[in-house]
Image (cartoon, grey):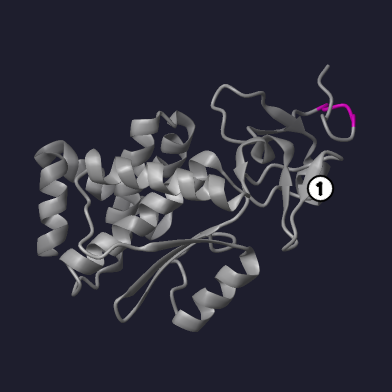
Amino acid sequence: MNYCQLCGKRLWSGGVVYTPGEDPDGPSLVVCRDCAKTAPHCAVCGAPMGAYQVSLPDGRRICGHCHRTAVYDTAQARALFDHTVHLLTARLGLHLRIGAEFTLADAHHLERLASETGLIPHARRGQVVGLFIRKGRSRVMYVLSGLPRTLFIQTVAHEWAHAWQGENCPLLEDALLREGFAEWVAYKTLQIVGAAKKLRLMEQQDGVYGKGLRQMLKLEQKRGIGGVLDFCRRGE
């Protein structure tokens, strides 16, 4: 007989299964339908949480699984940002003529910037996790503090792709192409670091992110990585 791993109730008719955190081989969490509806959910992975949860200064709460690899420290974040940029430039050839500053920000700061600039993500559920902002010759990438390592890398790669688009195809206005390409860049970066679970989740996304990514993956199968970059440059 199975029991809810949060409240201990017997699961007479089966429960709801979650896989908290980023580890594809990590343990599953099975909870009753009441806990799935009423328990607080992790602000990152969405799994319901019991007593072991971490409260962040900006009001978010995350589960212990996500907390294990979460990036809070500015120096740690800068090192991971630099590592991700190295992958983007050395492995994918996404060099920027004008570099970008990096800033770790809390949820309130990012939401305010998104509102002020109008850079609200398309159909993205939950809080803003990253932004790339241009002001004249100034370029700044903001990433949400407290993201687990893999999501941090994914966010940096996505925003870096937008920066590359700004330099190489500034007139591109099609949201499906813009966001699809940025998701594809993030996908390729996570392939390099071996984040299998996150890749599967990205492939299953709905909306402009998922549709655009799947379109770019099909294009890559036909033309290769260079073909995707040329496609984006021409804004086909």
Amino acid bearing label 1: Ala
Residue 229 in the image: state x and y as whole percent. Answer: 15, 51
Q: How far across and down, in percent of the image, does residue 136 sit?
A: 31, 81
**In this view of the protein, can residue 205 be seen by the observer?**
no
* Among the 4 quarters of the image, the one containing residue 190: top left
172 with respect to 29 (left or right): left
Q: Tell me which segment is drawn in magenta.
A: 8-12
- Percent position (x, y) of residue 122? 43, 66
- Which residue is the site of mark 1? 39
- Residue 231 lies in magenta, yes or no? no
Q: Which residue is at the far front?
A: 75
Which of the pair 174/187 is nearer the observer? 187
Look at the image and tell me in which quarter the N terminus lies: top right
* Label 1 Cα neighbours within 10 Å, binned few <14 / some 14-19 / many ≥20: some
Q: Nearer the viewer, residue 83 or 184?
A: 83
Q: What's the residue at 47%, 64% (across, down)?
A: 123
Picture residue at 42% right of the left edge, 52% below the top: 156
Asked which quadrant contains residue 221, the reply is top left
